[in-house]
Amino acid sequence: MSERLLSVEHLRTWFPVRKGVFKKVVGYVKAVDDISFDLFRGETLGLVGESGCGKSTLGKTILRLSPAREGKVIYHGLDGKDTDILSLQPKEMSFFRQKMQIVFQDPYSSLNPALTIFSSLRDSLARYGVTDEKEQRKIIGDLLEAVNLRPEYMDRYPHEFSGGQRQRIGIARALSVNPEMIICDEAVSALDVSIRAQVLNLLLALKDKMHLTYIFITHDLSVVEYISDRIAVMYLGKIVELAPTKSLYTHQFHPYTQALLSAIPVVDLDAKRKRIVLEGDVPSPVNPPSGCSFHPRCRFCTERCKKETPQLKGYEIDGNMHYVACHLMDKG
Amino acid sequence: MQDEVLVSVKNLKTFFYQSGRCNKAVNGVSFDIKKGKTLCVVGESGCGKSVTASSILQLLPQQARIEKGSEIVYHKDGKDIHIENLERNGKEMRSLRGGDIAMIFQDPMTSLNPVYTIGWQIGEMLQYHSDLTKKERRAKEIELLQAMGIPLAEQRIDEYPFEFSGGMRQRAMIAMAMSCNPKVLIADEPTTALDVTIQAQVFDLILKLKHDYHMSIMLITHDMGVVAELADEVVVMYMGNVVEKGTLDDVFRNPLHPYTRALLKSIPVLGKGREQNLQPIRGVTPDSLHRPPGCQFGPRCDFFKKGVCDGGLPAEKWVSETHMVSCFNHEES
Amino acid sequence: MKHRERVLQAKMDRILEAEEQGTYSKKKRNRVVMRFMNNRLSLVGLVVFAIILLMSIGAPLFTHYDPLKISLKEVLQSPSGKHIFGTDKLGRDVFARVLYGGRISILVGFGSALGAAFIGVVLGTLGGYKGGVFDKCVMRLSEVFMSFPQIILVLLLVSMVGQSMGNLIMIFILTGWGGIYRMTRSKMLSIKQEEYVQALKAFDVNPWLICFKHMLPNALGPILVNITLSTAMFILQEASLSFLGLGVPLQIATWGNVLNAANDLQVLKSYWWLWLPVGIVISLFVLSINFIGDGLRDSSDPSQMG
């Protein structure tokens, strides 16, 4: 059992909604609403959900690119020291920023169009001690090779590259400071299907070689199944189910996860599945429904579901910890 | 029993002219849209599938042109209408658009006019293509929204697109497209921008329409899963050419073209998890202005034969009555 | 088919043939420059601008007269072989005054535009990126300067600090920085949301570096256009002020000062050479700058097709 790298405790990120001349706060977009989980070293944790569920915001909040309202993100150092990243002063964050990096979704806006790759990447290296230009060039060259690109590409501009290549440059950038953890925020979603496989395989290879831990954020359930060890399913700012991948795909307990998996069009012609089609739209995170936020669309909804918010509880199933936030689990 | 063919596209070539260069976006594409059947055109970005759809309705930008030798024939009531010869914005073309052949697009936010209500936009279609009075139009608008599964249609008809969610907007667009009972519906990546659960809803709707109105659908997508679920027939495109086409069974159970096979092998299949061996297609899609000689897939193909595959474009070979592949090597692979 | 369509079809046929035979231009051309060159109006503007600018800079090459030299013997002579634009009320050669005057007017216009741009861009970049109290204060300040009717503000300041070229440039900068500040700021706000900026923040890179090395180059397009159009505006402003006698001191030749002679109905009627040539030059110059600015804006706009 590997050790924990990160512990997220009761994290909330609420964005204020302001109306009127005096910009009064009339409500909150509860993008991340009371999320807790552990991230173990060396694992890939998949974070899935549809648009508006808060998965991207969760990733950004962990890196303090979005402001958290309350909660803790505890980093467990290799030296045994535990630090709550959210409570640090901006100056103290510097050390931790090197440990945690991010790869973005949009290959077209994730690189500065006005600078060459070298110019873009060298500043992050300089920030963490590498100031000699020759050394910078060597490191960036090595990084580009690690992502299967030629080192001389560093003097080119982003528009000279394809989407897949840009995404690989983004990965190279994330790797440039030797992080321990990388958050891949929809890193392959904007790529063509055939390029996706290249980048996914690259990520897997790099993980082994450089002892990385990933949080892989996506809405594509087939991709996340391929790359993740464990998967967390999010709905309206909360985690509704969290389990090892195999376990999750064999048996889902939360009705939303069941509907989500059944909604995906499958390439296998012989797969006979009964599709569960959910009624209605995903509600807005400004006014989530009372109690369990999934209850208006849930075919098993009870009175209790309308009033009480279910907590994420762990159940031991087949030797694995399977977390579900659903009242129906109490019945056994 | 031969299925009735509504639209036959023969050797379609659509070229884009820009900065002194000619981009052969669609370079000799042929297929048939049959009555009551769903044809899926599948391929990655840049393969020309969207341009193909736009060409059928002549919805091309100024610098694009349907080249001589292309044929787009719409068979209506025994008559053959050659769309390629119609004036782009002439009376006949405009009455075809929306009236006989309708189209829905990928991003409903940008394809609906934000300053007019949904009801007004549907009404505009009805106004142009039918003789209904204002009252009759309004009734029809409400009926359409209801048929598309939008609740509280009488209220929502006076709302603006921004008050609708993504899935609703797509339904409203489908309502607009269906308002004049088209025989053919062209859907260009209609659910790519939508969530998976909403996508399921929209597909259910499209299937229902197909069933109720016996409508032909041409669905453009890059998602093989969608093809597997909805298609009757499949056309696989790469760099402006059709590399393989046939029924769903033909193409998915017995893919012949190396690109089709590579594509199917490089997609993670739900349920197979880590065990599956994802094999990416090596190389990148070439720039359409710097094309390889001969077969466009050549440089990335494991079965590339020098001297054969870089000579010219491979011809169409019919392996069965329904299954066509365009490859010099198909017997071996 | 209409004529235009026929021309378009023919052009397409030619391109197609070149493509098939491989005779198309293989040079890598800068798209922005290419688009600009295609815009006839901008090209004309560029040519006219260049002619007037070069003639002003190289004034001694085109005339041997001293623009300041008064010659009471040759007052109000109409254009002739000796004086191309005739002479003014004090016998000064008008052509020489127009040529040398161009130097001052263009200097004032361009200098003010650059100065205003410098202040506006620096403040806009910092304000857009940092936000907070600093940004709010500067916004309010810019609003104060912008909501004042500019001419009144200029007159006020002129009466306070006196007339001189330097003072005029300073005044223009003071009243003109607001526009470009707001434009830069809003561009910065939108660039701030781009993912590469977030990535830089994730690397804890120095904010100054982020602002000026990484974000600013992406906003340069509209800023450059703004500078060209501001130059035109300031030249016109200088001309108006000098026409009123409140600009650069009257004896120094500027376009506005030359125009100053025309504040008299008599002059307008009988001595057209005192105001018409300089008026045409000003109009042509300002128009040409506007065409160039439009061309720049159109050619660097990514939404336009080439």
Image: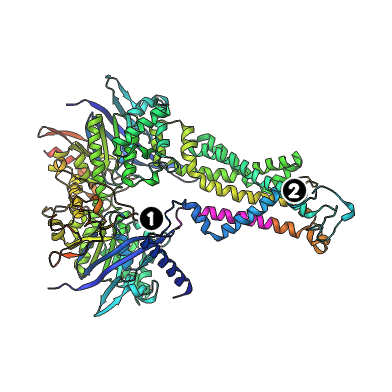
For the question of whether residue A101 can be seen, the reply is: no
Is disc 2 surrounded by few (<14), some (14 to 19) or many (20+) residues within 10 Å?
some
Left or right: residue A247 versus residue A294 is left
Task: Assess disc 1: are there few (<14), some (14-19) or many (≥20) residues with their C-alpha within 10 Å of its C-alpha.
Answer: some
**Amino acid on which the number 1 mark rests in the picture:** Phe
- Image: magenta residue range: C282-305
Q: Residue shown at 75%/39% (left/top)? A: C160
Asked if residue B94 lies in the magenta stretch, the reply is no
Is C301 one of the magenta-colored residues?
yes
Q: Residue furthest front?
A: B307
Q: Position of residue C174 (x, y in %)?
A: 65, 41
SS category of the residue bearing label 2: helix
Q: Chain of mark 1?
A: B
Which disc is residue C145 wearing?
Answer: none
- The answer to whether residue B332 of the structure is visible from this angle is yes
**Secondary structure found at label 1:** helix
Q: If the image is split into quadrants, where does the C terminus of chain A sit? A: top left
Q: Main secondary structure of the magenta part?
A: helix
| Residue situated in front as seen by the camera: A191 or C16 | C16
Q: Which quarter of the rendered picture does the N terminus of chain A lie within?
A: top left
Residue A157, image x, y percentages: 41, 43
Which corner quadrant of the image does residue C156 belong to?
top right
